[in-house]
Amino acid sequence: MAAVPRARFTRRIRALGAGILGRRSPSSQTPGMAPHGIAGPFEQRAQDALHALPQGESPILIAYTPLVRNNPYQAMLYSSCWERGIAAVPVDDLNDTGDLSRLAGPANVWLHVHWTSAVLGGATSQADARRRLDRFQALLDRFTRARGQIAWTVHNVLPHERRFHDLEVDVCRVLAERADLIHVLHEKTVALTEPYYQLPRDKVRVVPHASYVGIYPNVIGRVQARYQLRVPPGALTFCFVGAMRRYKGIDRLIDGFSTVFRERGDVRLLLAGPGLSAAEVRRLSARTRAVPGIIARFERIPEWDLQVYFNAADVAVLPYEDVLNSGALMLAFTFGRPVIASRRGLLTDMVTEDVGILFDPDEPAGLERALRSADTLTDPRFALATRARAEQYAPRAMADDFAALIRGWPKA
């Protein structure tokens, strides 16, 4: 990658209009990490970011989108970039960025796309979705013609809540064709996306999803956690922590647990996380009130309280119906919890016999059988194995690997 003098690069940034990459980006503190960005127009934020970089290496700017504030993954991923002369600045809304080609004059500017749901998000019709796709494609083309580089992190095969299936496939196809770098979290991502679109193998690089070791507090032990949640000391306890979205199999979990509770009684299920709407919260609340063994909290869980739910549980359950990667799996490992998980996506490879049980979601009673077998997972060796798995690849290792990937990527 050709070096670009700092003064020249800064002059190009200073020439940008205030609204090129979003009009404002509120600061967002992520647990254990620095805020995503400073409030204000992108021009000022970019200048401040560049001035903060260490001397000695040609500066690189990563404009990343969409900014996700309820997940520390992006802050974890970019945390070593700054020390390597790479400024990562969030884009609030890709559909309101203006002409990104004006940003891409220097040879070391990246547009980094994460979750693709933002591209067609809010589309009111097929025609509207098509216009959004065309606008997105035109933006990428202008950016690459101006010598900008594009990175795409493949988090999902396709967005989970999608109205326009074929157009969502087209979004991914457009990105795969135009991206200089395709970042995947597991080597099997290429094969799992192949039925829908092709990921050119020469563009693909693997930087796995780290655990969350050191990110979330973990000082409350099992006895205190169970006391706080009113979980009986001897009850076999399952947990599901995260947003209550349909594709995650919440209803299947409630049904399966209800059956097991009727059979033995000495079990509990902790459900903790927000619903997507007030109506969905009301529906889930009504369902869970009918099962005495369920302890539910349908709201965003403060970072401090995550440890309470995981440490009160014996086993985390991931009953996903549709999944590629799973940050929830790494979160369970971080707290030393074995898992019961669907044989779907990359869970099939990541949930080995030493850390959990896989079940076939296509079998009507598959989850129930797994829940009945969960007593075996209370053996201390499972907690040790999951914690060891988390320690194998901590956030700093992921951040270092990603920064090295960007710093060393050749300009075509």
Image: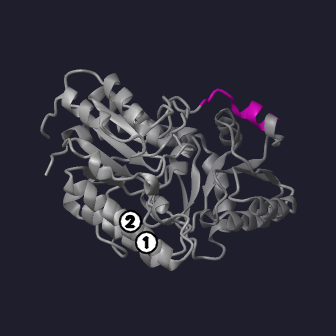
Query: Looking at the image, which residue sits at the far top?
Result: 55
The residue that appears at 56% across and 65% down in the rendered structure is 122
Please say which color scheme the image uses.
one colour
Looking at the image, residue 269 sits to the left or right of residue 352; the answer is: right
Residue at 45%, 57% (x, y): give it.
95
Residue 286 on image: x %, y % = 85, 63
- Image: 134 above or below 112: below
User: Is residue 201 visible to us here?
Assistant: yes
346 in the magenta segment: no
Q: Position of residue 320 (x, y in %)?
A: 58, 63
> Mark 1 belongs to which amino acid?
Arg
Q: Which residues are magenta?
A: 217-227
> Where does the N terminus fall, quadrant-wise?
top left
Whether the residues at callouts 2 and 1 have beta carbons within 8 Å, the answer is yes
Residue assigned mark 2 = 135
The residue depicted at 70 percent of the width and 56 percent of the height is 275
136 sits to left or right of 325: left
Instruction: Give SS at disc 2.
Output: helix
Residues 392 and 39: in front is: 39
